[in-house]
Amino acid sequence: VQVVESGGGLVQSGGSLRLSCAASGRSFTNSPMAWFRRAPGKEREIVAAVTWSGSRTYYADSVKGRFTISRESGKSTMALQMNSLKPEDTAVYYCNIDLVWGSWSQGHWGQGTQVTVSS
């Protein structure tokens, strides 16, 4: 199984970035996908998640109204559109596929992509 993120970078506060993730190596039918992040000195936290069909989403309170997760139904690819970025959004962002919905555990992880927001 391969999970690959792309799209990270450096952006000024208030700016936007779009992250992408693609998973391959086996069938992921009915597998949710999610974005997590780990900021310096903090534990990894879930940012957003989307079901296999793309019809149901979850957002952490800290990103609601600013981030949008999207996924084409039945595909093992997804994106995270991040708007109105803040310095506290600085973190390594990780993609996960096939995690357990609700507990946000297990699944397959990517290597992560760095997002840095300057003030």
Image (cartoon, rainbow, N blue to C red):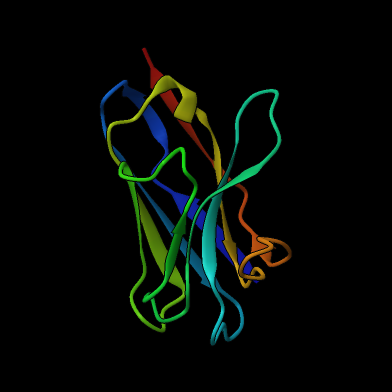
Looking at the rendered image, the quarter that the N terminus falls into is bottom right
Could you say which is closer to the camera, residue 78 or residue 24?
Answer: 78
Q: Residue at x 33, y 25 (%)?
A: 11
In the image, residue 43 above or below residue 67: above
Could you say which is closer to the camera, residue 98 or residue 51?
Answer: 51
- Which quadrant would residue 107 be assigned to in this image? bottom right
- Residue 112 in picture, x, y percent from top left: 58, 45
In the image, residue 77 above or below residue 52: above
Looking at the rendered image, the quarter that the C terminus falls into is top left
Could you say which is closer to the camera, residue 99 or residue 93?
Answer: 99
- Residue 42 in picture, x, y percent from top left: 69, 29
In the image, residue 71 above or below residue 59: below
Residue 87 relative to residue 1: left or right: left
- Residue 93 in picture, x, y percent from top left: 53, 43
Q: Which residue is drawn at 67% across and 41% down?
A: 44
Residue at the limit of the structure toward the top, as seen here: 119
Q: Residue at x 62, y 43 (%)?
A: 45
- Residue 70 in picture, x, y percent from top left: 34, 63
Q: How many labels does the image show?
A: 0
Q: Which residue is drawn at 58% across and 86% down?
A: 27
